[in-house]
Amino acid sequence: MSDTQDYIETYYRDTLKSDKSRPVLDGEMRADVCVIGGGLAGLSTALGLAEYKKKVILLEANRIGWGASGRNGGFVAKGYACGYRQLVKQVGLPHTKELHKLATHGRALIKKRIENYKIDCGPVLNGVLGVSWNKNEQGVRDYIDFMQTELKAPLEYWTEEQVRSVCKTERYHEGFYSPEDYQFHPLNYAHGLAGGIESHGGQIFEKTKALSIDEKKDGGYIVHTAQGKVVCDQVVLSCSIYIDGALSTKLKYAAFPVYTYVMVTTPIPEEILDSALAMRYAIFDNRFAQDYYRRLPDNRILWGGRVDLSGNTQNLAQVMLRDLLKVYPQLEGHVQADYAWGGALCYAPHKMPQIGELKPGLWYNTCFGGHGLVPTSVGGDVVSSAIATGDERYKLFKPFSKLWFAGGPLSPYIAQSVYYAWRLRDFVRNLKN
Ligand SMILES: Cc1cc2nc3c(=O)[nH]c(=O)nc-3n(C[C@H](O)[C@H](O)[C@H](O)COP(=O)(O)OP(=O)(O)OC[C@H]3O[C@@H](n4cnc5c(N)ncnc54)[C@H](O)[C@@H]3O)c2cc1C
């Protein structure tokens, strides 16, 4: 019996523009590069390689965008999961500026590809608003000042009055507005990238799990699947938290899984929705276990939030609906949950992507955490250009590419402790306000 899976039930699955499936690999194939994993990290890498005219084969164990890449909030925002100020502490300001340059390029590359490959993943709406759950005017001003002065990011300060004029809730205080970040339909984008790869002659196989990798004596690798193999010069591992120890125990134990969740409401009459959310920017609050949400084109709300280590989706729809009604009680009686799902994030202890080479020609491009849409574009860009042209920008990730043991079988407990510590911090902040 097959252990591959179809898409889980999500709003994105049900609004796919074209659910084109790809064949299972059957027999022996030859490629310059075999990319393993059909999330946005693998797809962006494979498309970059195909654009450089490399013969590329991508293997996906389930379906294109089946993992986090087809289940996320759809916020395309610059930056990395670890946050820029944390990054300065880890690698210093000059290095942070270089990583920020890559993120700016990565975000622009997504828009360029949407245009070049005519990817129907809209509406692509600019504008992301970060709001304070607790009053924190000076903190927000300091953050904007840092982002404007050091990283030239055009963030705008919003007063409490401005925030509440569009998010009609007393839960929020001041905020910052980022005009260049945007939102889109991530699963349609993933399919668009797949189409782009194929338009350059690249090949994609779904329901084709890479089971093992052998190094060839005369150089290069053989990737084995249940019904076939790919003989290639180089391999890229973009398997996120699903990485199997048979492909790399180092990568498997250098990360731990964290789960986060999304609920989508039924359509809400426009005037009632306007009484709560009077604009279409994507919104997130500043807690660790934050709410992140946006209006969908058909007047639903996509509500994301919660993080834990269980991945348990029992009663999820009702739990998430309650979270929404805590912020917007005026929607009570007008709104129901139509979809609810969870997804797994891949975290390293430093919260930065892991990008590098395990050995010559065996690359990894993974571990993007809860802020992955722009960074997967960055990872795909730097790894594909490193392979195709010898470009060394990927080395900017060197400080994070040491594959430290992240706890192995104990990783869930380590992650749970970190999670509780952050929740405790939110709780204490609430008490103070
Ligand atoms: C609910 C949720 C909300 C989120 N919201 C946002 C957001 O709004 N903005 C943002 O920037 N980020 C967000 N993220 C994070 C973002 O989605 C991820 O960081 C990003 O999609 C990770 O991409 P990936 O390709 O590394 O992993 P995935 O998308 O998980 O892809 C990995 C793929 O590898 C395949 N695979 C694994 N092993 C093998 C194998 N042996 N052979 C073949 N294939 C294999 C898997 O089947 C899977 O499809 C969110 C994530 C979740 C879960």
Image: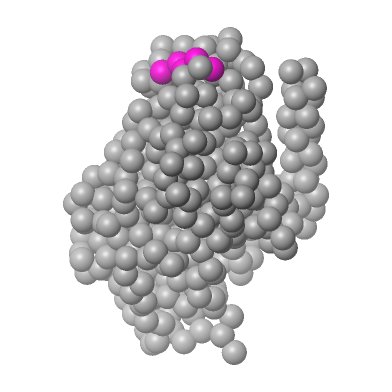
User: Of 389 and 297, which appears nearest the observer?
Assistant: 297
User: Of 377 and 163, which appears nearest the observer?
Assistant: 163
Residue 240 coordinates in the image, percent (x, y): 55, 56
Q: Examine the rendered structure and indicate whether residue 168 appears above or below residue 383.
A: above
Examine the structure image and report whether residue 158 is included in the region drawn in magenta.
yes
Q: Which residue lies at the image location 59% right of the left edge and 80% below the top edge?
A: 3
Q: Is residue 293 visible?
A: yes
Q: Is residue 109 left or right of residue 279?
A: left
Q: Which span is picked out in magenta?
A: 156-160
Which image quadrant for residue 169? top right
Q: Examine the rendered structure and indicate whether residue 233 appears above or below residue 229.
A: above
User: Of 57 and 340, which appears nearest the observer?
Assistant: 340
Residue 281 coordinates in the image, percent (x, y): 41, 36
Outermost residue on the bottom side: it is: 1
Examine the structure image and report whether residue 376 is included in the region drawn in magenta.
no
Q: Which residue lies at the image location 74% right of the left edge and 22% below the top edge?
A: 429
Q: Main secondary structure of the magenta part?
A: strand
Q: Which residue lies at the image location 77% right of the left edge and 57% below the top edge?
A: 409
Q: Is residue 362 visible?
A: no
User: Of 139 and 375, which appears nearest the observer?
Assistant: 139
Which colour style is shown?
Answer: one colour
Residue 50 coordinates in the image, percent (x, y): 25, 60
